[in-house]
Image (cartoon, grey):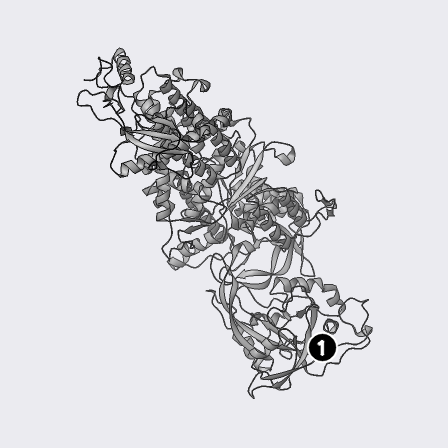
Amino acid sequence: MSEKPQKSDVADYSKTLFLPQTEFPMRAGLPQREPEILKTWDQIGLYRRLREQAAGRAKFVLHDGPPYANGNIHIGHALNKILKDVVTKSQQMLGFDSNYVPGWDCHGLPIEWKIEEENYRSKGKTKPDFRDSAAMVAFRKECRAYARHWLNVQREEFKRLGIIGDWDHPYATMSYPAEAQIARELMKFAANGTLYRGSKPVMWSVVEKTALAEAEVEYEDFTSDTVWVKFPVAHIPYGPSARRLGPPNEPYPEMRPMLPEGASVVIWTTTPWTLPGNRAISYSSKISYGLYRVTDAPVDNWAKVGDLLILSDKLASDVFKQAKVAGFERMLDVPSSMLNDMTCAHPLRGRGYDFIVPLLEGDHVTDDTGTGFVHTAPGHGREDFDIWMENKSLLDAGKISTTIPYTVDENGAFTEHAPGFTGRRVLNDKGEKGDANEAVIKALIDVGMLLARGRLKHQYPHSWRSKKPVIFRNTPQWFIAMDQPITTNPIRWEGSGVASSDTLRNRALKAISVTQWVPPSGQNRINGMITSKPDWVISRQRAWGVPIAVFVREKGDGSAEILQDEAVNARIAEAFEQEGADAWYMDGARERFLGSRANEEWKKVDDICDVWFDSGSTHAFVLEDPVHFPGLAGIKRKVDGGEDTVMYLEGSDQHRGWFQSSLLESCGTRGRAPFDVVLTHGFTLDENGRKMSKSIGNTVEPQKVIAQSGADILRLWVCATDYADDQRIGPEILKNTIETYRKLRNSIRWMLGTLHHFRRGEAVAPAEMPELERLMLHQLGQQAVIVRQAYAEFDYKTVVASLSAFMNTELSAFYFDIRKDTLYCDPPSSVARKAALTAIDIICDAVLKWLAPVMSFTTDEAWRLYRPDAEPSVHLTLFPDGLESFRDDKLAAKWETIRNVRRVVTGALEVERAAKNIGSSLEASPIIYVSDRAILAKLFDVDLAEICITSNYEVREGEAPPGAFRLNEVPGVAVVIEKAVGKKCARSWKISLDVGDDPEYPDVSPRDAQALREWKALGVTVGS
């Protein structure tokens, strides 16, 4: 029976049909319904009940990567938080104690910017003078209030997504206990000797006036000035006694060519402004070099006839082309042994740059572009700094000062360490190019050292906040050493027997190797980042953050001794615990914390910690703090011999951000990673694959989607995507998601309506069920294996895809369609009807639980209607167990044949319906020709009229007539459709010769007559 029968002309039998009845509406109305469900969760204390219910289970803790408390949430936030919620709910339903404590990152520059803009610049007020303690503390209080406001706004927006967690007790990096613990974590690095103050080139934002970590930098197109510059050869020593650089025991060649007077080494750079900071030239022994003479050039050219230039042989032609040289000749080889001993003069010698410029061999030098030589300014580049420091002992031996000048200040202006250029700007306050490049280039032209200039569009580092270019500049900063041994105990690598020094880098690399990465590609990504990571910069020169709460005493070499005093450290941490980190900036803080040592030469450090150090320490003040987070108390991870698991989940950009800072912080202080599993997701793009931008107008705001369609639509979209890759969202994609949701909801609604007539006391044992029910339970058992494994592996797209196919194809389009006649029309006493209801009850129970982490609101609304006598929320249940016992592969194989036959019949019916020979399939009586005896043997005990939803059928062995309908993929089966013979049952619409056999009910079939008698016995008026 495929449709509800219309009222008979003779009698109305509708009251005698078991038609679906449910309060679960066809139209979801999610925007209105979901807030009501959220209130219900609050009323029943859902979060509390989950914790009470899970007490004693192994813990699965998803530690929240803190979003920044600044502005409304966007679609990326929604994706991230929904994924976390699906993890948490599914792990809880898999049998773990899965507790989610949300958190927020509250310190840092963006909030400072907002306060400066909203509270000062926009009102014409002067920014506070942070040298004044009261002004500093007042400004920090403004920042704290701003962060608290947005924390509360975002909390409500996250809750609206259906996220279950400890929203009443979230963590915040600005809470007093958190600030105290961050300070304690920093003190641990000071104690183990890895924290130090150094002078290093760091990426510096002129606009933001702060150093940036790699995680805060993105690369964008930028057009740079390029110059080819001559460095005059100053000296080529001969003989061992004259050697300046190089391995001391390496013998000199007996003979080598003489360089003529006046030769120059040529360098190429895209940052002319760094030339005042030049202190060396790098070369490679793998590159072939030669001495070239210019033979022809325009009269007014920078490159003159007779110029002698040392260049990479591979790049010489390109250089002369750039220099507009019409003719040149190669005079002789310049071997690397000669370069090793060579020194040059700075091109601006005589203008305050009267020092020796040595040549240093470096692995970073290539002959892909440029000249084969690299201008080396150790204050303006990481590789420049590294090669300079690697050669420190040789430079000292050659009486070459290794002091790195501070040529550029925090405003991007040259200092007095750049003679002739003081005050010139590399970048201005808006991040635009200043006049430094042109000033340097003009000076080079004036002294005849410029060979050529040009412009190059290339990828250049920009601040991810200001979107403005950054510069490398030498600054005093605080670092955590990556390669400083922490203890004398070696790190042993499993399986190899190799031992390494106990450094932060090696600890982190080992921790990476024993962590589960989802997807696995994440391991290689972070492994590469840690392998090549320079010392970790953790300082910022700003106001709103946790201070680097140490005292230092200056040393004569520019470094600083850190005070190691447990009593001082305890006073600091205790004050932060009670008053927050503002205590560090209050009047008298130095004397308060130093106590009896205040008369010593200890200086208070006022730099703040990088926010990545803050968030990297969250494991310490959340996962390890049973006082403030008792729900997380007692975590004993597998690495400690326990059963508990800690997961971190964020976007793939956090390999360079939170994953990395958390890894390094924990490895430095605890010797291991703070996590067992790390899951990453991609970024959200529009449906055309473009990055979302307000200026383009292609953003999708989660608030609008929720207001129009409901949070469950967003949740379904998240779970249906391959989150490991970048996801797309837009109107058309959401339209498809809504359609998927509609089909799932309709299947749930039909099951709820049908089960209105189910009494659990009348349940039929699976073994006593008809084959069709046992087939569906077999398929349910298959789904159980797929769904449980997918949830265990965090593969939510498989959950959605598998359950959608099962519910739409196997249930709605097959099983439900077939069983409607039995369910609606069979007598109350029918075992077949009761068996079908029992099977649907088992299926409904499983489906609602399996979909609960995905469609949290919809399944919870359905659950309360389905099981009002059970748990008050589906989220308090576990995934069903034991469904795999329904598996019956032999039965499934038989029914695969039956369904193939059904496909042929259905195809034949469609042809007849299209030709308007029949309307409903109940008007047909197919003749099924089977020439394959193996198929025939599987059909003898099957009611194909029921399976094909026809009124009758006939199976004939042998070949079919030529006009019969066939499907190529089902050989041996053909169908001819004939009209069903007999009368139409007024109750079930089936056409049968036995309609009228029962004189009491002459307009229905005997089956329906028996049903009417039973209904009448139950007191139901029949046929009025």
Number of callouts: 1
On the rendered structure, is 113 left or right of 439? Answer: left
On the image, the x and y values in percent for residue 299 come to 56, 88
Front residue (pair 178, 759): 759
Task: Provide residue 93's location: percent of width, then percent of height.
Answer: 49, 30
In depth, the one of 939 and 306 nearer the eye is 939
- Is 178 on the left or on the right of 825, as rendered? right
Q: Is residue 289 above or below residue 169?
A: below
Q: Quadrant of residue 302?
A: bottom right
Front residue of this view, candidates 935 and 58: 935
Quadrant where the image shows the C terminus: top left
871 versus 351 height, above or below? above
| Residue at the spot of label 1 | 333
Q: Position of residue 971 (x, y in %)?
A: 43, 36
| Residue 921 in picture, x, y percent from top left | 29, 31
- Mark 1 is surrounded, within 10 Å at the Cα level, by few (under 14), some (14 to 19) or many (20 or more) other residues, namely some
Whether residue 802 can be seen here: yes
The image quadrant where one finds the N terminus is top left
Secondary structure type for disc 1 = strand
> Can the viewer see residue 883 in this picture?
no
The furthest residue to the bottom: 299
Amino acid type of the residue tagged 1 in the rendering: Asp
